[in-house]
Amino acid sequence: MNWPEGWEWLDEPRERWDVPDSLRGPAPSAPLNLAVAMLSCEFLGHELCVLVGRFVTENAQLYLRPPGKGLTFREQSLISNVLTRHTRRTFEAWERFRLSEEREGPAHEVRRLLQENRELLASELNEAILAFSRLPGSVL
């Protein structure tokens, strides 16, 4: 499509994701609902709890602005795209981690799978935290 100069970015591919029902409540935000689900897990562990807290913090800081200091449409679109991408990836890693505990089989195999998926979840949380922190956001 032909856009006015400076609006070509609208042709860039956008992240698409149908948010699962499990992330539609109780909060009005999929990232916050994901954090609630992860923090409700009995076997999450302290290190992942810290990362979930940082995930929530970086997400929330994107919305802190003084009166009259808004974002451009392009900045809002960028934030939405990055939030969607990293919330989806973190959710997928969370689901693998959560389901690995329910897996049947020898205990050593279940522990190995749980540890692999714990590391994957930690990696995805760290990537999300870094991506969120690089977005145009909080002016605090």
Image (cartoon, grey):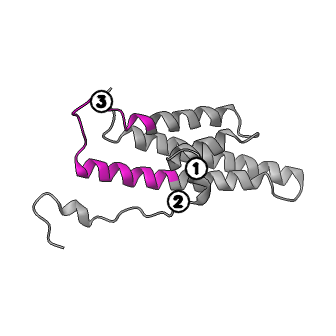
Q: Residue at x 43, y 64 (%)?
A: 16
Q: Nearer the viewer, mark 1 or mark 2?
A: 1
**On screen, residue 136 above or below 83:** above
Q: Residue at x 58, y 49 (%)?
A: 25
Relative to 34, 45 lies left or right:
right
Q: Are marks 2 and 3 in contact (CB under 8 Å)?
A: no
Query: Would you say residue 74 sits in the magenta stretch?
Result: yes
Assign a secondary structure to mark 2.
loop
Q: Which residue is disc 2 drawn over?
A: 19
Assign a secondary structure to mark 3.
loop
Q: Which residue is disc 1 drawn over?
A: 25
The stretch in magenta equals 60-87
Counting every numbered tag in the picture gives: 3
Structural crowding at the residue carrying mark 3, measured as other residues with C-alpha within 10 Å and reported as few (<14), some (14–19) or many (≥20): few
> Is residue 26 or residue 31 the one in the foreground?
26
Name the spot of residue 54 as percent of width and height, x first.
52, 33
* Mark 2 vs mark 3, CA separation in Å: 29 Å
